[in-house]
Amino acid sequence: MTSLGSPRVRGLRLDGRALAALVMAVSLVTVGITPERAYAAKGKSKTAKEQKDPREMEARQAFAAGNYKDALDIYTTLYAEKLHPTFLRNVGRCYQNLADPEHAISSFREYLRKAKDISVDEREEVEGYIKEMEDLEKKNAAAAAPPEPPANPPQPLPPAAPPAGEPVAPPPGLVMQQSAPPPAPANAPTPVYKKAWFWAVVGGVVVAATVGGLWAGGVFKAKNQNNCPAGTTCGGP
């Protein structure tokens, strides 16, 4: 009687490792995969898992060095190519450090909407980033708003009166309008010295006075009378 031991295949004794390899080979041949193809697929899967895009390392280095604009450009390109939500989170972090609250909030919210398998702690962390950016946005809006006028603005003081005896100058930009003299009444009587008869009378008086003076001075006496001796009467020839 044959003792129990390792199974035999066509008269060959197989140990445990050989039996396992034989079973695996039969299974692969059954589904149409050769051992060589299976090994290649396993190696390819491992290589794809370990291999990373070198641009990710470049972006992390730029972010760590404070070159947030360069890191932002790389992460934006990676998200456009791969559409992985993690790149949206990285984009939001770049905008956060660039003090751009509007774009940072948009990126973080889009990340929370698309990333379905994040933990509770990570979600709270991203929501904290959003709250920080909202506070910064309000602060910037308050700084840009014009200051409100006071409720009771101080009234300007009246100008001081000039010293006595000095002319009062009009304020700048104000033209003093001089009042025109009142018009003469329409029916005002004409003065006497402006009438013609007044000057005719004056002229007559002057002529009469002149003639009288000349007569009194003997200008109009006869020549022979002027040559008569005193006390005598000059007669004719």
Image (tube, rainbow, N blue to C red):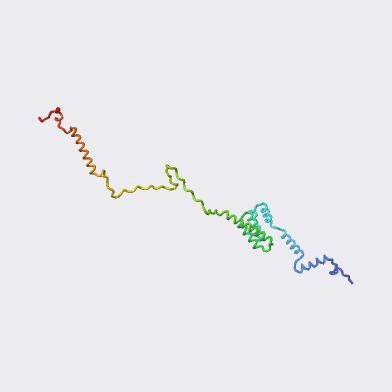
Q: Would residue 132 appear left or right of 26 to someone viewing this image? A: left
Q: Would residue 13 appear left or right of 185 to someone viewing this image? A: right
Question: Looking at the picture, how far across and down is residue 149, in whole percent?
Answer: 53, 53
Question: Looking at the picture, how far across and down is residue 172, in whole percent?
Answer: 45, 47
Question: Looking at the picture, how far across and down is residue 40, in whole percent?
Answer: 74, 62
Q: Is residue 236 above or below residue 114?
A: above
Q: Residue furthest left?
A: 237
Q: Residue furthest right?
A: 1
Quadrant where the N terminus sits is: bottom right
Report the front residue among 21 and 108.
108
Question: Looking at the picture, how far across and down is residue 144, in whole percent?
Answer: 56, 54
Report the front residue among 172 and 32.
172
Q: Residue furthest top?
A: 229
Q: Would residue 65 appear left or right of 7 to someone viewing this image? A: left
User: Which of the 4 image quadrants contains residue 145?
Assistant: bottom right
Q: Is residue 166 above or below residue 10?
A: above
Report the front residue among 200 and 152.
152
Quadrant where the C terminus sits is: top left
Total numbered labels placed on residues in the image: 0
